[in-house]
Amino acid sequence: MGKLAITGGKPLRTKPFTQWPIATKAEAAALKDVLQSTRWGGQPFPGKHAREFADKFARLHTAKYGQCVNTGTVAIQAALKAIGIQPGDEVIVPAYTWEGTVGPVLLVNAIPVFVDVDPDTYCLDARLIEKAITPKTRAILPVHLGMRFADMDEILRIAAKHNLKVVEDCAHAHGGKWKGKGAGSMGDLGAFSFQTSKLITSGEGGAVITNNLEYLELVQSYINAGRASLTDQFKKRIIGFNYRLGEFQAAVLGAQLKRLPKEGAIRQKNMKRLESKLKNAEAIGLLKPDPRITSLAPYGYVMKYFADKAKDVPRAAFVAALQLEGVHCDGLFYEPVYKSSLFPVDPTDFPALSWGREKPLDLRSMYSCPQSEKAAYHEAVWFPHQHFLGPNKDVDDIVDAIHKVLENIEELRGLDHKAIRNQRLGRADRES
């Protein structure tokens, strides 16, 4: 019997961390208001709660316009339609992200072009973008991942130089700001998710924000079955679908938006405490801070684990040991999209992959992004954001669990890998 819980010892923590989502009387009152109104969604469009939330959410992110949609994936798809992405166009995307970032590119019959991530942030590496630009490139789709921003200064410079559009994937960045500008407000449009694990959640849902009225009108038409937008100044008509958000979900979002600043301050304070106590841990690396991030929006706390500094014990064993000490975390949180089982792309389903080519593009085998693969399979460790909504004791337990595992790392050597997988408490919730 060892000292670690995974080898038979006593777990460091048995008390649950803060549960997520958090439901309060404010959500209950808002839901009751919708229930009694009998206007639960559909028409009139948008509903009262959806309109109020979208307006406030856009203002929080320093954008003029906001529109609720039914998922974050649809938010990206609607944004791509708004900027005029056509079949066969190319869109530059990061390799290390949720598959739902890339799926919408294919669903509008465009072609995703994978670019590796910056090892300091795990976000799209702006230094590699220009090498990926071709005459067919029409847009860049950066993802503000985990707790960092993609380098928007450089991305916007490149976009302006090459006449490209920018759609920000802000599924992790609710309330985040870059040099005082809100996530999603710097590019042409920003796309957000409100899926269960997000910093604001209605179970499912999403939003698009923009400073461009024409783009807003196209988004509204696209998600409201092709109907004319509310303002209809540009008189554009497109085929649309029912991608609206229901009023019950919008009501929940309105209540949560009021708590976001307070919760954000708590997370930031606790994460600083964590970093101050981990900065000297030899096998642990911290993501590089960036002073241009003026408001932190950590979807999860992300750190690095260096197996070569932990007696070559693989990350899977380290993560499993932490989980059984009572600290939930995940290593294989994301994969490079081109390697993921959730990306079974078949060229026969997406004709643009074959146009003008002797052989269709094989997106699953034509890319190698070493930093994305290192993060996915060896290095990145993700902790859920709700672990940082509690008291100092919660943070100290995370730190103590990490040190406990590292100090007894030899106990993990030789453990059966199948047993490790079976003993893990389960991956953090995937996005959808």
Image: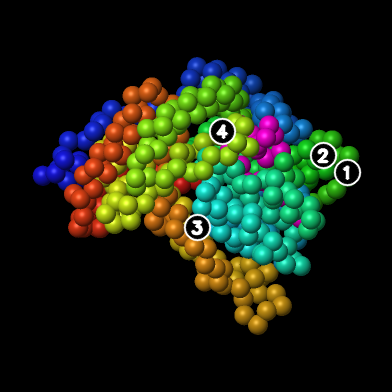
Residue identified by numbered label 4: 296
> Do the numbered discs 4 and 1 sit on residues whose CB atoms are within 8 Å?
no
Q: In x, y percent, where is residue 197?
A: 48, 38
Q: CA distance from mark 2 to mark 1?
A: 9 Å
Q: CA distance from mark 2 to mark 4?
A: 28 Å
Residue 372's mark? 3
Q: Bounds of the magenta span?
A: 164-185
Q: Nearer the viewer, mark 4 or mark 1?
A: 4
* Residue closest to the eye, 73 or 399: 399
In the image, residue 270 sits, relative to residue 368, either above or below, namely above
Residue at point 65%, 43% (across, down)? 191
Q: Quadrant of residue 415?
A: bottom left
Mark 4 / mark 3, whichever is N-terminal:
4
At label 4, the amino acid type is Leu
Label 3 crowd (10 A; few <14 / some 14-19 / many >=20): many
* Residue closest to the eye, 423 or 207: 423
Q: In x, y percent, where is residue 426?
A: 34, 46
Residue 21's mark? none
Residue identified by numbered label 2: 213
Mark 2 / mark 1, whichever is N-terminal:
2
Residue at point 71%, 38% (across, down)? 185
Mark 4 / mark 1, whichever is N-terminal:
1
